[in-house]
Amino acid sequence: MISLLQVATADGLPTKPISVGTWAQQLGMARPISLKALKEKVDQILSHPGTGHGTGTGPSSPFIDVSLTVQPGPFNNLNISGRGFLANESVAITITSTRSGSPSAETGAAFQADSTGGFSGSVGVSCPAGQQTTHTAVARGEKSGRVSNTGGVSC
């Protein structure tokens, strides 16, 4: 059973953990709370860009999500998806890989945002056996200059 949530601000900054009940109450949901109803409410909120913090108008803050898909062989897929960029703009991705006992290495990638300002794609990264490796990514809109949160995974 999930009893606490770590919620993030529109800028991707974590807030203090709160109970699921308190968060659902803040969203205007009645109790008892089902996971299906909670997911539907979150999906509803995410489908309305530009209505977050601040004045409630204007573009939403760019946000990326990063996950890792383990593949056979030397490379794994770093999956990156984002939203909050201009429609059809090129989005530059900077990936920083840090291995235990080694200096950081940076690589780049680029994705094309769709008509809603969202994108998704994968980049090959290595996770050498016996070395803790952290991969972080940040996205920057080439035309807008909008910069996302930093997302990351470890392997």
Image (cartoon, rainbow, N blue to C red):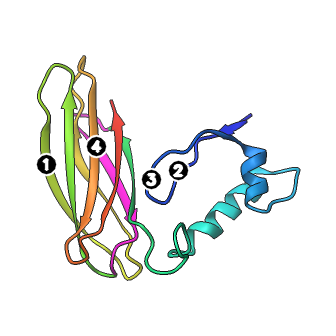
Q: Circle 1 is placed at which residue position? A: 107
**Secondary element type, mark 3:** loop
Most distant residue in the front direction:
55
Q: CA distance from mark 2 to mark 1?
A: 27 Å
- What residue is pinned by disc 4? 136
Q: Which circle marks residue 8 in the picture?
A: 2
Query: Residue shown at 58%/42% (left/top)?
Result: 6
Q: Mark 4 near mark 1, Cβ–Cβ under 8 Å?
A: no
- Position in image of residue 18 (x %, y %): 67, 41
Residue 139, image x, y percentages:
27, 60
Q: Is 101 located above or below residue 105 in the figure?
A: above
Q: What secondary structure is found at the residue carrying circle 2?
A: loop
Q: Split into 4 quadrants, where in the image is the N terminus?
A: top right
Residue type, numbered disc 3: Gly
Mark 1 and mark 3 residues within 8 Å of each other at the beta carbon: no
Answer yes or no: is residue 56 visible. Answer: yes
